[in-house]
Image: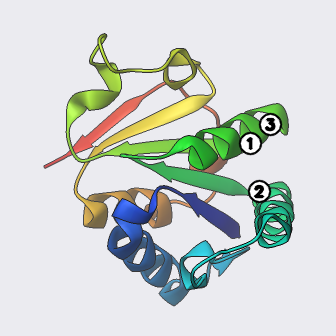
Amino acid sequence: MKFYVASSFKNIDNVRYLSEQLKSQGYVQTYDWTQHKKVSTLEDLKEIGQQEKNAVAESDFIVLLLPAGKGSHIELGLALGLNKRVILYSPSNEIDNFATTSTFYQLSEVEKFIGSLDGLVEFLTANAEETFKYTKHVHSVK
């Protein structure tokens, strides 16, 4: 199964950790944006944007790790538009904080997972067949 992890550079260690855990279980990462060095031109941005767009399209599912930046939210929109499975991850319940949430976080196509990264890995890998069903669940693991 192919996956893509969307997040911000603030979360780079968590993105790398999650990606390595999934790859060790046989999953294939469609693109690793954490390998980018300093970007200095609009052409670089265009190329990266195309690679990220392609990666979302090629993935079976994406995981959006909060906190996430503007690019991650565009990737979320692409994934929803392409009917990809979307898992929204937060270590706390900020997902449902009315003052800070997004309308798109509340869509029935978006699965929410609240808890530890290891719990998220377990959730994603425990039953691969089941994880591809769109459900409106908040999964919590402490």
Q: Residue furthest left?
A: 142
Residue 56, numbered label = 2
What is the secondary structure assignment of the residue under circle 2? helix
Residue 83, numbered label = 3
Viewer can see residue 130: no
Q: Few, some or many C-alpha atoms within 10 Å of disc 2 (few <14, some 14-19, many ≥20)?
A: many
Q: Position of residue 82 (x, y in %)?
A: 85, 39
Viewer can see residue 56: yes
Residue flagged by tag 1: what amino acid is it? Ala
Sequence-first disc among 2 and 3? 2
Q: Residue at x 31, y 20 (%)?
A: 96
Q: Are marks 1 and 3 in contact (CB under 8 Å)?
A: no
Sequence-first disc among 2 and 1? 2
Answer with the quarter of the image where residue 44 lies. Answer: bottom right
Counting labels gives 3
Q: Few, some or many C-alpha atoms within 10 Å of disc 1 (few <14, some 14-19, many ≥20)?
A: many
Residue flagged by tag 3: what amino acid is it? Asn
Q: Residue at x 43, y 28 (%)?
A: 137
Q: Residue at x 37, y 78 (%)?
A: 17
Q: Where does the N terminus fall, quadrant-wise? A: bottom right
Answer with the quarter of the image where residue 109 lies. Answer: top right
Q: How far apart in space, not on screen, are marks 1 and 3 (Cα)?
A: 6 Å
Q: Position of residue 30 (x, y in %)?
A: 73, 73
In the rendered image, which residue does mark 1 sit on?
79
How does the figure colour the protein chain or chains? rainbow
Q: How far apart in space, not on screen, are marks 2 and 1 (Cα)?
A: 6 Å
